[in-house]
Image: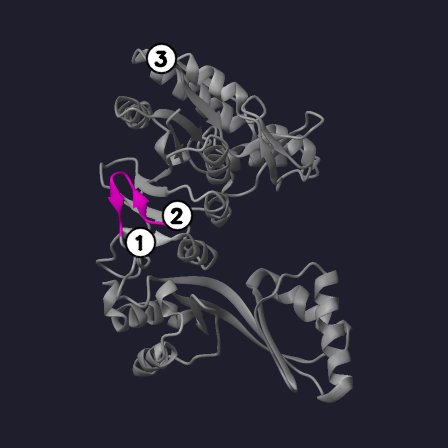
Amino acid sequence: MKFIVQKFGGTSLVTPELRDLVAGKAITAKQEGYIPVLAVSAMGRSGDPFATDTLINYIKKENRDTSPRDMDLLMSCGEIISGVMMAATLQKKGYPAVCMTGAQAGLITDNTFGEARILRVKPDNIIKHAKEGKIVIVTGFQGVTEDGEITTLGRGGSDTTAAALGVALDAHYVDIYTDVEGIMTVDPRIVEGARPMDIVTYDEICQLAHEGAKVVHPRAVEIVMQKNIPMRVKCTFTDAPGTLVTSTGEVNKGTIDITRDRTITGITQIPGLTQFKVVVDDGAEGLRLKRRLFKGLALAGISLDFINVHPGIVVFTVKDDARQKASQVLENTGFVAEITPDCAKVAAVGAAMTGVPGVMAAIVEALTREDIQILQSNDSYTTIWVLVKRDDMEKAVRALYRQFTAIE
């Protein structure tokens, strides 16, 4: 069976007119010989009647200490409403359709309420309905434990649902529909003329997503990558081809050559960070102190990023909202930190940079030209990160975009 999984976010479902557009995408796929399976998010955004954040705000007015188990029951309602509405839209157009919850679709998860992980998918029920000629709509963002408890998958959970269904059904594509025309080379709110990329590798989009590009959840990419299922990031509102995410580049009748002469695929940014510098003695005593430092922060549940450990000094960042707690933990364990608030991480991502000399030199040159101070840097095979002041973030993004003209 030739399945295609299509995921639609809440902004694509909020009005009858938009749901007609979504139905059109599914109908077109069916006319092209695919068996469409839709994964849908809750309709709208915070403030809209059935959005997940709206439901959360309703219950918090009643009781801010509602159990995680009951919160998952509540949060699963938004997707059920979307799914039933989409099934009704398709039925009205003369296409048999059925809505299924995550449990009915066979998405089995662990019991971590609010952030459940999918353990496996049993797609028998989906296949049964597909064989009967129905378009199946699956509620995103949710699953069920072995003992029947409803769970939700955390932010980006509908992307994860679509990816898991794609793998379970051995789909030809997993299409993630959004309100933009693909994965952009750079944030269009910062750089005028930013354009969607035609094709990126799984590794590149995972890195872009982790570093601030919010078009698709990195967990979803990691799932489809396991079975080399191509993912396409497309726009609900146009017929633009979008961005193909793949490792092999093989689609339809030929092979797309993903060997590119550009070193950098995209530029991303994450604001809202605070840098900590802690001076620690060298030698054996220094190692003991570093271990105590990191253990204290871990026990306090503080997530660290951008970690550099050198003889005599430890440097790391935390989110701005964890600044006060991190500072208190360090003080309580006897450390004195130099704290720089209001920072931002800017990342240059590209699989082609591996082994290429001069990339960091080009980054330093571009930022120096704009008189932007680099507070910290780090790199991997596919990414170079720099930490700058928040006030310099947008200027830094534009400078790097101009520097690496191959992405323009």
Q: Are marks 3 and 2 in contact (CB under 8 Å)?
A: no
| Mark closer to the chain start, 3 or 2 | 3
Report the magenta residues as a range: 246-256
Q: Where is residue 302 shown, x and y percent of the image?
A: 66, 61
Mark 3 secondary-structure assignment:
helix
**Separation of disc 3 and disc 2 at Cα?**
30 Å
Q: Going 25% across and 57% down the picture, which residue do you hit?
A: 194
Q: Coloring scheme of the render?
A: one colour
Amino acid at pointer 2: Val
Provide the residue designation for mark 1: 184
Residue furthest to the front in view is 254
Residue that carries the numbered disc 2 in the rendered image: 215
Decide which of tag 1 and tag 2 comes sooner along the chain: 1
Residue 350 visible? no
Identify the residue position indicated by label 3 in the image.
Answer: 91
Residue occupying the point 48% across, 56% down:
210
Residue 62 in the image, given as x and y percentages of width and height: 65, 32
Position above or below: 281 against 140: below
Three-letter code for the amino acid on which mark 1 is drawn: Met
